[in-house]
Amino acid sequence: MRTRKLELLRPEEILDEMRRCPVVFLPVAPLEWHGPHLPYGVDPLIASELALRLADRLGGIVHPCLFLGTERERDPNTLRSLGFSGTEWIVGMDFPANSLPSLYLPEEVLAIAVRSQIHLLQKMGFRHVVLVNGHGGRNHVAALKRLCAEISAEGRCQVHYAFTFPAGAGMWSRRHHASTDETAVMMHLHPEAVRTTALPAPGEPIRARDFGIVDEDAFEGRNLPEGIITEDPRAATAALGEKHLAAATEAIVAELRESVTVRIQ
């Protein structure tokens, strides 16, 4: 195809591809704080890139990303693991030291918006919608998975869920935010938007609570009382980022070939 991007396709091109492969990929993720060194669009940008790679491999069309997402307040145990007292009211990654807030929607608003968009794509003629989720917030993930099950059960359109860092694939951390893995992917996709010099000098510690950068050790409270991260974004490379994208693509392609019941390449 000339392009997989829905917004750049003419009507006859959309119809031709829908007849061949009635699948649309819908990236979903919020604009969110990712430390002082990364842009706000990390999650949407990664989701959009993966959606294009999936469509190139499997066929189908890519809808523009929905820059939408939700988060919940952190529970006291998680707050203490991150080096806080446990009594603070902190939603998602909006730590007190951040200079700007994230753009989180209430969970019910996210569900209404995504459900409505899926129904519009169904009306357009797509038989399969793949939600390519770029955000790991637990209530965000739960809302999207619930929509997949709910709309699929209606029988008119099958909705599938894919995550940008699928479990059991690749070498990325199980839980991370703005640390080595996402920094590496952004170095590959948009190196001009990454500025690791905004972080402490190499060798100096990065405390999760001070920068809104978290890795698995910090989430689990393994480096208390300081709450220093060990997955250092200053060590990230563009080559590692491309490896992550390639591994994620392969894992999601394998999953979708099992679940999408139309002929795909």
Image (cartoon, helix red, strand yellow):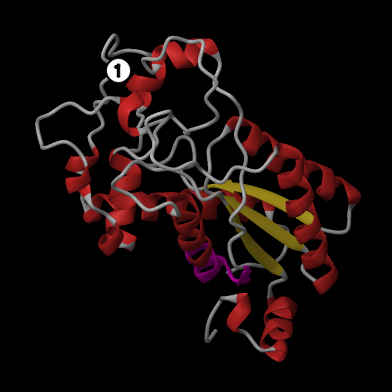
For residue 176: magenta?
A: no
Residue 242 in view in this figure: no
Q: What are the residue bounds of the magenta stretch?
A: 53-63
Does 151 sit above or below residue 177?
below
Mark 1, secondary structure of its residue: loop
Front-most of residues 35 and 143: 35
Location of residue 114 in the rendering, given as x and y in whole percent from the top left corner:
73, 53
Location of residue 190 in the rendering, given as x and y in whole percent from the top left corner:
32, 62
Q: Which quadrant holds residue 73?
A: top right
Q: Name the residue: 56% across, 76% down.
A: 4
Q: Quadrant of the C terminus?
A: bottom right
Does 228 sit above or below residue 265?
above
Q: Residues within 10 Å of mark 1 (few under 14, many from 20)?
A: many
Front-most of residues 202 and 185: 202
Residue on which disc 1 sits: 227
Q: Quadrant of the N terminus?
A: bottom right
Q: Which quadrant holds residue 9?
A: bottom right
Viewed as shown, does residue 36 lie left or right of 45?
A: left
For residue 55: magenta?
A: yes
Report the number of discs.
1
Location of residue 132 in the rendering, given as x and y in whole percent from the top left corner:
58, 53
Viewed as shown, does residue 123 lie left or right of 35?
A: right
Residue 204 in view in this figure: yes
The amino acid type of the residue labelled 1 equals Gly
Location of residue 20 in the rendering, given as x and y in whole percent from the top left corner:
70, 78
